[in-house]
Image (tube, rainbow, N blue to C red):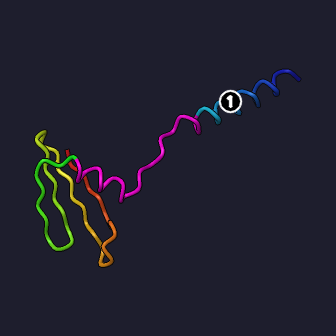
Amino acid sequence: MKNPIQKILLILLFSISLTACRNEAETADEKAEDLIENADEMKVKEDKIKIENEDGSEAKIKYDENGDVEKVKTDN
């Protein structure tokens, strides 16, 4: 009787630890704003922004026709 209770408690503890330690995902808008704030060089086209940093990393932000962030792509 003691063994199944221990297994259940162990599973419960494990599941709680996994959900408590995960990072909350950033939205595309938040990620785009952060990239723009920390950019060293920006190239702006109609609906795209290309961001280059001194460390060689690049990011591309694409906006849809409503002006909302459609896609954020980062390259290192």
In the picture, residue 51 is in which quadrant?
A: bottom left
What residue is shown with label 1?
13
Q: Which residues are magenta?
A: 18-37
In the picture, residue 28 is in which quadrant?
A: bottom left
Q: Nearer the viewer, residue 6 or 49?
A: 49
Place of residue 14 in the rendered image (x, y in percent of width and height, measured from the top left): 64, 31
Place of residue 6 in the rendered image (x, y in percent of width and height, measured from the top left): 78, 24
Q: Main secondary structure of the magenta part?
A: helix
Place of residue 20 in the rendered image (x, y in percent of width and height, measured from the top left): 58, 36
The answer to whether residue 44 is above or below residue 55 is below
- Residue drawn at the location 41% of the way across and 56% of the way down: 27
Identify residue type, mark 1.
Leu
- Residue drawn at the location 19% of the way across and 44% of the way down: 76
Residue 4 located within the stretch drawn in magenta:
no
Q: Nearer the viewer, residue 66 or 11?
A: 66
- Residue drawn at the location 81% of the way across and 22% of the way down: 3
Secondary structure of the residue carrying numbered label 1: helix
The answer to whether residue 29 is above or below residue 19 is below
- Residue drawn at the location 33% of the way across and 77% of the way down: 66
Residue 22 located within the stretch drawn in magenta:
yes
Q: Is residue 19 left or right of residue 29?
A: right
* Quadrant the N terminus occupies: top right
